[in-house]
Image (tube, rainbow, N blue to C red):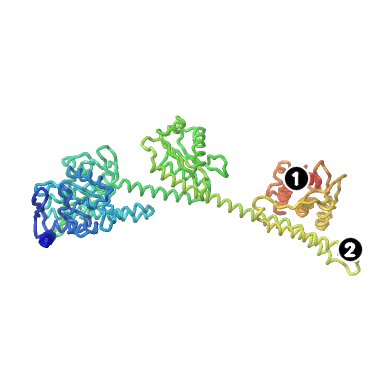
Amino acid sequence: MTEDINELRQKLRETEEVLQAIQNLEVDAVVAHTPQGDQVFTLMGAERPYRTLVETMSEGAGILDEDGVLLFANDSIARMLRTPLETVIGSSIRKFVLPERLKDFDALFEKGMKSASKAELQLVAFGGVTVPVYLSINKVKVDGRYGACLVAFDLSEQKWLERNRDIAEDELRKFLGQMERRVEERTAELASVNIELRASENQFRTMAETIPQLAWMADPDGGIFWYNQRWFDYTGSNLEGMRGWQIETVLDPKVVDQIVRRYREAIQSGNPWEDTLQLRSKSGEWRWFLARAVPIRNSEGKVIRWFGTHTDITEQKGVLDTQRFLSRVSAVLTTSLAFEQTLHSLIELANAHISDGCCVSLTQEGSAPQLVSFGYPSGWRRESIEDLQRNLSTNVILTGKAELYSQNSDKFLSFPRELSIGSAMVVPLLARGKVLGAMSFYSTASSRIYGITDLLVAEEIGRRAGIAVDNIFLYRQAQDAIRTREDVISIVSHDLKNPITGILLASTALERIRPNQDPTQLYQRQVQSITLAAKRMQSMIETILNVGKLETGKLFVEPRAETTEALIAEAVEMLQPIAAEKSIRLTWELGENCRPVWCDRLRTGQILSNLLGNAIKFTPIGGTVLIRAERNDNEVIFSVQDSGPGIPQNQQDFVFQRYWQAPGTMSQGSGLGLFIAKQIVEAHGGHIWLKSEPGQGSTFYFTLPVNEVRKAA
């Protein structure tokens, strides 16, 4: 037993010495004991500069035999696996593959041993830590036997970015740029080493073939003499057809001159070249690429080669373009609080970028959706698009979920054929958990068939538009609240005017009492006038305190049984001093069987005060104002008749509107008296009207319910 243990220890020491010699570049071959017998593996072309380059790469790199055993690996792959390099070398790569992905790796390895393969996988580092990687496996020949060259890119940072989509655009671009530059710089370094070390040329090209970009090399004057296989696979060309400056044949002809000019300027200056351009694939598809080229210099600083790459950024550019478009959407939605202008500008922007026709429908408190803004081709019939919009928006508003319609869906059969719609999207306008409406996008172009990605963009537009519409509604409510507040102030100031005038006149009368007069009776009458006016003012103050109900358009009333005689007498008593100033005679009459009415005493006083105040104001000096009350079935009709100039027929429909004033009287009041009177009458369940003939005065009528009728009800 002791001999066996010593023998194992001796083999372990020998293995460690061999691994140390490989790392110190002291050997160029390794003898491996395999089930098939002893086999010799040489490290062909592993010159010190090339191996130093591989050792310093941040990407993991290694050589596998046909069974997947790592014959060579750099420090980066050991760090990636959190495992000592001496443990990694000689181990099967399958040992580090996530068990659930072993089948995927075996398929990848099998394909790579035939030609080339790449895929995303998960490796398992020491401690069970999962490392997402992008593996590239390419068939290579090692000392007469076939193996594989393995390059592993750590995707941990990229995956983190994918899980955090809200990362700033600049940071995303910076990350992509750093990743691309890292690959290009390493590849350029490989190019520099292989140019100066001819023996490593084949190894460099092998590594260049494994990178995911389209790669090429050019001479000092910029003429391209080599492309990797990925370039030929994408463009469908060959070296003879693309040699020199023939790359122009796969560039967009609209911008080829500008691109070539910028490239040649970089070549002449010796500075790195970077551009964003479109390349045509062999199938005719145009895709976006980030093109870069870096100069490779010799020890004297002279440019001896250019190494370039084209990185496909179609998806990334799509994301950036979408972000820019959504930024413009936000700008449009926040430019104005004018409802119609905002939606019209949004529809114009949508039709310029993602749709041929666009409509917005809104709903309020469960009502049917109403088409409020639209933009569509001139050939579309409005009736057809309105019917279609109504049907589509109703369903989305009810469910709160977006809908995607294509020619393969059953619901698409209901689309009017004359509109020639190829696909459509309908998304809800959401804000504060409520569906405010729906926005529809229609495409007539066969080249623009909406998919899930388009629907996600449309949903984001709907979300932002919903918030904007909600803000506009809130702004309008705030403006209405401000107007209501101003109305309250106007109403109170208007209704306080008559009581204050009464107080001033009564107090003036008290001051005029001569010493030889009996003041008792006069005092009593004037004090009563002052007390009554004060009560009116108190009522107005209560109105201010009841602003909440005024904002909803409902005046607060507390009805009870009141005699018509007391109501009229009280109003006449308060306004008598004002009438006396103009020598106007106030008279009043009660009809037969005039019963008590069901009303709010103070509010009814406001009605009579406003009507009497207007009558006194427009009656000439020495005129007469008549107040009457008479029963008519279940109500009492009150009337106030003046002998003023009357109201023209074309103005009579407006007299009870807010702020209306008779022509030529704009400086005589606030225009709220009749409006207030109408609101109070209607709050009692009555109605108000007038009769007037120019030159013959005006008579205003209003009704209040009889007390007995209210009791029976």
| Residue 61 placement, left or right of 672 | left
| Residue 406 placement, left or right of 116 | right
Image x and y of residue 658, in percent: 68, 49
Residue behind mark 2: 521
Q: Is residue 198 visible?
A: no
Residue at 30%, 55% in the rendered image: 157
Dot 1: element: loop
Q: Nearer the viewer, residue 98 or 343?
A: 98
Whole-number angstrom distance, CA of label 1 to CA of label 2: 39 Å
Residue at 86%, 63% in the rendered image: 524
Image x and y of residue 566, in percent: 84, 53
Q: Nearer the viewer, residue 631 or 162?
A: 162
Q: Quadrant of the N terminus?
A: bottom left
Residue at 71%, 43% in the rendered image: 651
Mark 2 closeness class: few <14, some 14–19, many ≥20 residues within 10 Å = few
The type of residue carrying mark 2 is Gln
Image x and y of residue 622, in percent: 84, 52
The count of marks equals: 2
Dot 2: element: helix
Residue behind mark 1: 686
